[in-house]
Image (cartoon, rainbow, N blue to C red):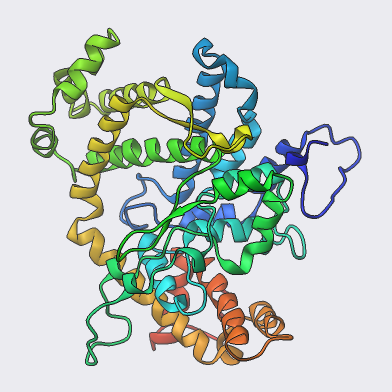
Amino acid sequence: MDFLEQRRLVQGKRPNDVRDEFDRDEARLIHSAAFRRLQSKTQVLGLGESDFYRTRLTHSMEVAQIGRGIVQYLSKSEQFSEYQKHLPCTSLITAICLAHDIGHPPFGHGGEVALNYCMREHGGFEGNGQTLRILGKLDKYTAEHGLNPTRRMLLGILKYPAAYSELVNEKAYEQDPDKNAPYWLFEARSQKPPKCYHDCDQEIVDFIFEDFDETDVAKFTATREYKGKHSKSLFKSLDCTIMNLADNISYSLHDFEDALSLGMITQRHWREHFEGKENLFNDLAKQLNREDLSFDLITASLFHKDSFCRKEAIGSLVNLMITNAIIAKNQSGCEHSLLNLEVKLEPKIEELREHIFNLVCEQVIFDENVQQLEFKGQKLVIELFQTLAKDPNRFLPKPTRERWKKAAKGLEGENKKSAQLRVICDFVSGMTDDYATKFYEKLFTPSKGSIFDRL
């Protein structure tokens, strides 16, 4: 067996199982509780506002479809024939893409900021780092190794190969103290976590890199400091760049499509945003000999009264991006192909994608109504965490309470406190939006809750 197919816990196949190791990865992920929970977690727009737009689950399915499309395109392109043997198989890239968001907490980035605020003195919280933690440790497929994925799948999920303690800059958290403000009231921007994995999951990362050359690992895990901000890791593995590109395409175009459908982005917004930049479309239309990509035609289709025209335009843009993905050497200087190759968009296509995404940010993500709902979820998560942390023996469900007690064994002082708070963080981050709301109401709303409730 190739070392990339190995698992931390050796598990033989069941009788007559003809699947390869990456088929098994995909199946485990699809049947996991963490994956199912994505159906009730916010993507951008809050759940319950409509039954039309994307949740984290439908977003992840679309990312997987785009990821497969990128691999299929690159594997048939003569331009990249020398790199094709290094591309992941369909089942592997599907598993990586489907799994990429399972660590994200309820209420989107508001939930992530809230948990990092609660955990910043105890190892922090970052959604991508939690994804690695669920896959390698928490999911119930095994007792202690989570879904026990292959080494290559874990490498593909490791979006930021540096630990919280290595990247965190406490000055980035600084804010003017306001003694009169409640503990849950703060500027969200100042409490964002570094993009990292959690220090308590170092053994998973050690397993990922144990059979790679030490010099390669040192180059691949390099970081860069930024004055007054958290440091950042510099590189992602080949498989991770495919997943990341598929994610970028999906949230740029599919969140855009949702915004069009709900009227949050109008033709006026679109034309004003692209004023003076129409040639981003027109030049591509000429270069690729595709009239459907001219600015006037794409605009007419996006804002046509018939929804199928809008769908056709979004499909054309997705196709444009998939078929302009390229494989190139990154700047790491690593020898191993998985560490020194990356997949990205042609520069002009990436510029177009960024402009569309910036429009989504302006009109949707930073919309005051979206931000107000995100803040409400953020406050809810902080109050839940603080209550559970204050009296865990009283409020934690029995299985989580047992994990909380077990986490303290052999530890003292701050190490004990950090380990037990991590269990509470795992519990809250694993909640769906709906579960977190019901749990909150049971604790804080007098008219809600019963001793017979089974959340």
Relative vertical location of residue 160 with respect to residue 184 in this rendering, above or below: above
- Residue 17, horizontal then vertical, whole percent: 85, 36
Residue in the image at 45% along x and 85% along y: 386
Q: Nearer the viewer, residue 438 or 345?
A: 345
Q: Nearer the viewer, residue 291 or 1?
A: 1
Relative vertical location of residue 368 with respect to residue 280 in this rendering, above or below: below
Residue in the image at 84% along x and 49% along y: 11
Q: Nearer the viewer, residue 86 or 304?
A: 86
- Residue 84, horizontal then vertical, whole percent: 60, 20
Residue 344 picture quarter: top left
- Residue 431 in view in this figure: no
Residue 427 picture quarter: bottom right
**How many numbered dots are placed on residues in this image?**
0
Classify residue 207 as left or right of residue 68: right
Classify residue 9 as left or right of residue 93: right
- Residue 120, horizontal then vertical, whole percent: 44, 76
- Residue 361, horizontal then vertical, whole percent: 24, 48
Relative vertical location of residue 190 with respect to residue 178 in this rendering, above or below: above
Q: Quadrant of the C terminus?
A: bottom right
Q: Name the outermost residue toward the top.
A: 289
Q: Quadrant of the N terminus?
A: top right
Residue 266 picture quarter: top left
- Residue 132 in view in this figure: yes
Q: Nearer the viewer, residue 53 or 3?
A: 3
Residue in the image at 72% along x and 82% along y: 406
Residue in the image at 46% along x and 71% along y: 436
